[in-house]
Image (cartoon, grey):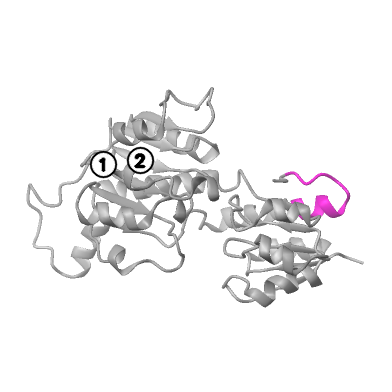
Amino acid sequence: MKPHLLVTRPLPDPVMTAVRDSFDVVGRESTAPLDHDELEASLRDFDAVLPTLGDLYSAELFARVPAPRCRLLANFGVGYNHIDVAAARAAGIVVTNTPGAVTDATADIAITLMLMSARRAGEGERLVRARQWEGWHPTQMLGLHVTGKTAGIVGMGRIGKAIARRCHLGFGMRVVFHNRSPVADAGVPAEQMPDLTAVMAAADVVLVAVPGGPATRHLIDAAALAAMRPQAHLVNIARGDVVDEAALIAALEARQIAGAGLDVYENEPDVPARLRALENVVLLPHLGTAALEVRTAMGMMAVANATAFFAGQEPPNRV
């Protein structure tokens, strides 16, 4: 008998075909995260779950289902801060993720946001759509020319290194970075600075690429933002709560920094009205991996993790 597996959100057709080859699948049609009752049922009624961002597998949930049938959470995504991994392990549940598949697509969105914020592209598009553009003139909407400037990368993992390559090789940018552990090879010439404040102060564009979780919550706080240059821009493609959203709004409103580009938010999908009202911020709806081939690759990696686990093998991407 095939293991009984829950897929919590609709996934690309090739992924669903692949997962049905090895599992007895229930594919949930809703695009919303699992609710309280669905989360309990997922642990109680299935051998494995393929969850994703927003499906909150907390310590409290595992306490409510003390003897779960579920043995595997094959997460769709590299980030897994919505899963309390320690509590899952204590309950006898293996957790896997999908690194690698998301690296280049997420780095591409970081560069998209960098250029949109620095060159005021979102503001300019709104001007045209509102039919308020009065024509070209020499001092219209002057932004930051990023070529040759300094990129400050916070988190030099796979995605941070991919961003560094794009900044250095594509725009001739000097790269400085902050990372919690030493990085011997960033892939391009780059300087690891002694602390976060030094990176924030040195950079013309700060690009945040750290994992989510308690250790990085509000890492970019009011003090970090205060260290930035007035002409600098902040880009966040990590997790929303890595940046103190209230502090960022205050910094943008006061023109303490020149702008920001965000793909993630503290309380997705809620984006505060004060943030939406600002012209000096670019707001994307969590598009980091939103390309069909990337989402398909992520799904195939999650399926490979699940298939290996139930074949008695070590999953390729256990966390």
Mark 2 touches mark 1? (CB < 8 Å): yes
Asked which secondary structure carries label 1, the reply is: loop
Q: Which residues are magenta?
A: 305-316
Disc 1: which residue: 232
Foreground: 227 or 4?
227
Residue 311 inside the magenta-drawn segment:
yes
Disc 2: which residue: 206
> Where is residue 187 drawn, in percent x and y?
50, 27
Q: Is residue 94 above or below residue 203?
A: below
For marks 2 and 1, the one nearer the N-term is 2
Asked which secondary structure carries label 2, the reply is: strand
Task: Name the residue rendered at 54%, 29% in the picture.
Answer: 181
> Where is residue 113 drawn, in percent x and y?
36, 50
- The quadrant in which residue 16 appears is bottom right
Task: Name the residue rendered at 38%, 66% in the picture.
Answer: 271
Foreground: 224 or 136?
224
> Where is residue 17 drawn, in percent x and y?
73, 65
Q: Is residue 22 visible?
A: yes
Foreground: 286 or 225?
225
